Amino acid sequence: MSRKPIIAGNWKMNLLQSDAKALFEGIKAFCADKSATVLPTIVIAPTFTSLSVVNSVKCDCGCGGTKISVAGQNCHWESSGAFTGEISVEMLADAGCSYVIIGHSERRQYFSETDEMINKKAKAILAKGLIPIICCGETLEQREAGVTDSWIAGQIKAALEGISSEDVAKSVIAYEPIWAIGTGKTCDSDEANRVIAMIRNVVKEVAGASAADSIRILYGGSVKPSTIAEQMSKSDIDGALVGGASLKAESFNQIIENTMTVMVK
Ligand code: 13P
């Protein structure tokens, strides 16, 4: 089974529109002379206010916009209504998104998002034909207490509850150990691969072998140009969700380039 790698940049709450445009143009320029078949799937998640800016420069190289996809960083599960401050999947699709990141640990931690909310979001995203990037991961305390696997298995089972095998197969999971996010401490790549293989087994349990073979599972947490080739060489790591290193075209493009050296699994 060959799974096309994904390199996704999560810009979090960073960059004004002009900076977002310049960064996106820098990534686009890097991709311009490369065919979509040699590139990994590239996904960029800007702030909501930069979605239209990024989409206005999305891709005019003749690839029909297929080289770089755009993601929302969050969504609500209802399609419209009295939910001040929220944004629906339809609105994200209307703004040019084809992916939505959900369940990021920063949203779970600072905005009290629960597994149940993440499950509703995943269903809403899939119902509108977009792809959820479902985040999971353990704290340092949980790792030290030896409950990493059971905690993550619980997050994945809850997120995928009631979703068809076909839809699970299209989805993306990002394993982001919380202690590795923004800390410069990358999870050992064999350990990241072990956890991701465990996640794939959980997917097999809930959605069957074919979905488990197809679903792309990314690693996130202090990914840098110097770490990506080794991470990508592991059997179950299908790409990366990049935070800090996605905020500079030079480092993000280098991550893409280093991924291309180990592309086919
Ligand atoms: P860093 O790459 O900055 O550690 O962030 C990872 C992350 O949270 C991506 O969603």
Image: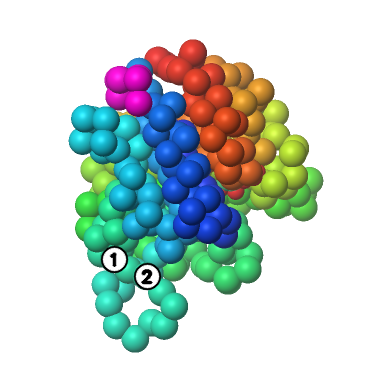
Q: Secondary structure at mark 2?
A: loop
Q: Kindly identify which numbered label has been placed on residue 136.
A: none
Q: Quadrant of residue 168?
A: top left
The magenta stretch spans residue 216: no
- The residue at 50%/42% (across/down) is 23
Q: Position of residue 78 (x, y in %)?
A: 30, 73
Disc 2 residue: CB within 8 Å of ligand 1? no
Q: Which residues are magenta?
A: 32-37
Q: Is residue 242 above or below residue 160?
A: above
Q: Amino acid at mark 2?
A: Ile
Picture coordinates of residue 122, whole percent (x, y): 36, 57
Residue 37 coordinates in the image, percent (x, y): 30, 20
Q: Is 36 one of the magenta-colored residues?
A: yes
Q: Is residue 89 left or right of residue 225?
A: left
Kindly identify the residue that appears in the image at 52 percent across and 50 percent down. Answer: 19
For the C terminus, the quadrant is top left
Which residue: 32% across, 32% down? 67
Q: Categorize mark 1 by other alpha carbons within 10 Å: few (<14), some (14-19), many (20+).
A: some
SS state under label 1: helix
> In the rendered image, is residue 153 in sight?
no
Q: Could you tell me which residue is drawn at 58 percent across and 56 percent down? A: 14
Q: Tell whether 199 sits left or right of 150.
A: left
- Mark 1 lies on residue: 91
Image x and y of residue 6, in percent: 42, 33
Residue bearing the label numbered 2: 87
Q: Nearer the viewer, residue 16 or 99?
A: 16
- Amino acid identity at mark 1: Met
Q: Are the residues flagged by discs 1 and 2 in contact, CB closer than 8 Å?
A: yes
* Mark 2 nearby-residue class (10 Å; few <14, some 14–19, many ≥20): some
User: Viewer-proximal residue, 185 or 62?
Assistant: 62
The CA distance from mark 1 to mark 2 is: 6 Å
